[in-house]
């Protein structure tokens, strides 16, 4: 079978398509033929060797897939060959066949496309964990979503609206701002404008944001503290460098900065997260936005695109 293979850490060019043996399937495992493969910023960090977790070389990248069950191992009875599923945190998802443990797999509702299924694992899983398991967001609170036009951002906007929160999202282009509004944000700001955060007090009755989802902490974190509401929480989801902050901005508000990574999610948390996500797909409160599709052979171009400014929905590979 064909698979993306990385034999050394480095730039996008280290990813090559090779012929490799298909994976076997053991007890409690499911073999999936991907129809769509999610591309996430974390995939580029891992490929470059700069991420805290480094796989053993050589490896096949990408952890989010959606497709058709090909085979099931002993003990797996709730899905069978031919079923539509999505899977997350998979080892070696960037291939024509991928193996997952049973706990990593969910049924894909008929109304959702395979491309949308490939958007569920990292983007929607991250947004759910950040909003509900870490920040403990509640209906009626105001949520500021930085980078709300990207994969995690659009997921967060949809989830927050579905749970009764007031949502303010930011994007870096006019098309991105329009997309944020289309996903349900009450207000959308262009973060290319130098003074965009000064508008937040006027949008919140002077209170500020109860929860801030921060995708680029090295740029925004200190300014986030200026617009944080009393007892507010800043969730650091993404960061690309060091940053200096003034802790006094937090002290007077009893504010909290919380960091997270999806890799720390327990299996029990995954069960809770994806029970909610599948329900959202079924009842149409969640509708992943697909921005770009690339064939498997263009994985390097997809890795470049996912890191470019002006994110617009989810990027997927099509085997």
Image (tube, rainbow, N blue to C red):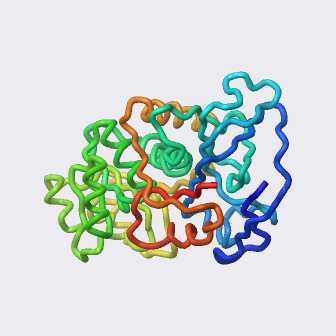
Is 170 on the left or on the right of 134, as rendered? left
Is 280 on the left or on the right of 175, as rendered? right
Residue 136 location in percent, x, y?
41, 41
Residue 17 falls in image quadrant: bottom right
Picture layout, residue 55 above or below residue 193: above
Is 226 on the left or on the right of 88, as rendered? left
Question: As rendered, which of 160 and 279 lies closer to the eye?
Answer: 279
Question: As rendered, which of 212 and 170 lies closer to the eye?
Answer: 170
Q: Quarter of the image for the N terminus: give it.
A: bottom right
Picture layout, residue 126 above or below residue 217: above
Residue 116 location in percent, x, y?
49, 46
Q: Quarter of the image for the C terminus: give it.
A: bottom right
Which residue sits at x=73%, y=48%? Answer: 97
**Number of dots carrying numbers:** 0
Which residue sits at x=50%, y=51%? Answer: 123
Residue 139 location in percent, x, y?
30, 36
Can residue 141 be spotted in the picture? yes
Which residue sits at x=44%, y=62%? Answer: 215
Which residue sits at x=69%, y=44%? Answer: 33
Residue 14 location in percent, x, y?
71, 74
Residue 301 falls in image quadrant: bottom right
Residue 66 falls in image quadrant: top right
Can residue 229 be spotted in the picture? no
């Amino acid at each position: 079978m064909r698979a993306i293979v990385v034999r050394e850490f480095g730039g996008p060019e280290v990813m090559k398509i090779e012929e490799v043996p298909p994976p076997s399937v053991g007890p409690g495992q499911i073999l999936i033929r991907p129809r769509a493969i999610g591309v996430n910023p974390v995939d580029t960090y891992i490929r470059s060797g700069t991420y805290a977790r480094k796989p053993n070389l050589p490896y096949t990248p990408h952890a989010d897939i959606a497709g058709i069950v090909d085979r099931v191992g002993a003990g797996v009875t709730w899905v069978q060959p031919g079923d539509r599923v999505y899977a997350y945190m998979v080892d070696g998802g960037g291939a024509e066949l991928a193996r997952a443990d049973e706990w990593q797999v969910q049924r894909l509702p008929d109304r959702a496309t395979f491309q949308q299924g490939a958007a569920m694992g990292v983007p929607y899983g991250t947004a759910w964990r950040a909003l509900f398991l870490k920040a403990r967001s509640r209906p009626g609170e105001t949520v500021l979503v930085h980078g709300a036009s990207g994969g995690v951002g659009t997921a967060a906007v949809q989830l927050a609206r579905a749970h009764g929160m007031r949502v303010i999202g930011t994007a870096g282009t006019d098309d991105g701002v329009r997309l944020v509004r289309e996903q349900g944000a009450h207000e959308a700001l262009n973060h290319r404008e130098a003074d965009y955060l000064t508008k937040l007090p006027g949008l919140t009755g002077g209170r500020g944001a109860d929860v801030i989802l921060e995708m680029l902490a090295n740029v925004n974190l200190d300014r986030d503290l200026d617009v944080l509401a009393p007892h507010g929480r800043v969730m650091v989801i993404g960061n690309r460098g060091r940053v200096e902050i003034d802790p006094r901005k937090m002290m007077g508000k009893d504010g909290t900065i919380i960091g997270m990574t999806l890799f720390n999610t327990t299996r029990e948390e995954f069960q809770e997260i994806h029970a909610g996500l599948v329900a959202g797909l079924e009842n149409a409160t969640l509708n992943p936005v697909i921005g770009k599709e690339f064939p498997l052979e263009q994985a390097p171009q997809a890795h470049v695109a996912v890191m470019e400014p002006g994110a617009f929905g989810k990027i997927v590979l099509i085997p």
